[in-house]
Structure formats: C-alpha cells, structure tokens
Image (spheres, rainbow, N blue to C red):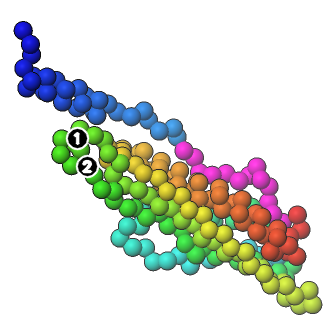
Amino acid sequence: MMPSRRLVLAAGLAALALSACQSTPPRPATRPADFSSFGPIVLNAGSVDVVEGVRAAGGNNVEQRSPVTPAEAVRRWASERLQAAGGPGRVRVIIRDASIIEVPLPKTGGVQGYFTNQQAQRYDGRLDVEITGEIPGEAFFRGRTQATETYSITVPENISLADREATFLQITNRLIQGLNARLDAGIRKDLAPMVRR
C-alpha cells in the first residue's frame, strides 16, 4: 500500500524540523587579545596619553555589549605596547572610531524560512586610531601615524547570549590584532625620531 502524498509531506517536514532544531556545537572560549609576546615600543617621551574622540553612538551601536569593548582594547594595547622612557616628548593615542554596528539581514519567508536557521544579523566592527608624537626644543619633531581596521561577521537567528558575547569579543580581537601590526609599522616609520627600540 503506497503512503499518501500528505503523509510523505508531513514526514519530510518533520525531518526538516528535527535537523533545524539540532543545536550547534558550543563556540570555543575567546580571551582578550594579549600583546605581551611582542614587547614594548620604547619611546623618547615623558608620557603616552590615550584620548577618546569616539563618534556618538547610534541606535545600532552594540560595542558596549562586548566583554571587552574596542576602545578598551586600544587602551590595553597602548599600555602593553607603548612605553614612555622619559624626556620632554609627548605621545598621544587618539581613538577616532571604536564601534561595532548591528545590521539586520533579510530573511527568507514561508515554509523554507520557518524550517531554516537563517543568518539574522551582521556585525561590522571598525577601529580608527591616530598616534601623534612631539618633541619640543632644539630637537623639535612632530609626526603622526594612523591606521584603520575593519572586520565583519554574521550570526544565526538562534545564537545564544554567550555565543553572541563571544562573537563581539572575536570582532574586538580581530580589530586590535590587525591594528597592532599596522600601528607598529607606522610608529617605527612615521615617528622614528621618537623610537628608542
């Protein structure tokens, strides 16, 4: 006896529902980026100041939901990588942008959309940092270097709170790691008279 088309359709939908409900494996633990292995950049300066000139947050800004915000990551980076060795010089780290923006994604409707775990949001991270240095007096020098880093990732609609927070931290880590390489090279090139080692 042949099963009815209605019964076959119901069985197929049930199979789809079961596959859609299966939980994804837990995301591996993410830790804040650590720069101790790079060693400090020693500068001819009496101070290294971090200044936040971050643009005003809008309705889609979610960086404050990260366990470590991008701005906090820049401050940590500056404290671990930039070492003032003394003297009349001054170095400023200016955070121009340190944001994570949530962008809703369009979803597929109908039966297919109902039984599909769709990508629901995209998160666009951006860090824009400028470093200025100045030595007054006879050995007068003034220079600047700047770097921008971006990183985007999408997440599914059934993502857990813990996995979403881990995603924010992943974005922050990717941003600051990329910025570390760019600023390291920029400081040694554009602020060379201030670099001892």
Q: Nearer the viewer, residue 45 or 168?
A: 168
The reply, left or right, for residue 140 in relation to residue 106 is right
- Residue corresponding to mark 1: 112
Furthest toward the top, the residue is: 1
State the quadrant of the N terminus.
top left
The reply, left or right, for residue 195 in relation to residue 101 is right
Residue 149: give x, y in percent of width and height: 60, 64
Quick check: 11 above or below 169?
Answer: above
Any mark on residue 108, and which? 2
Would residue 69 be seen by someone viewing this image from the given angle? no
Is residue 35 within the magenta segment? Answer: yes
Residue 51: image quadrant is bottom right
Is residue 190 within the magenta segment? Answer: no
The kind of secondary structure the magenta stretch mainly shows is loop
Q: Amino acid at mark 1?
A: Gln
Q: CA distance from mark 2 to mark 1?
A: 7 Å
Residue in the picture at 9% in, 13% down: 2
Residue in the picture at 85% in, 88% down: 136
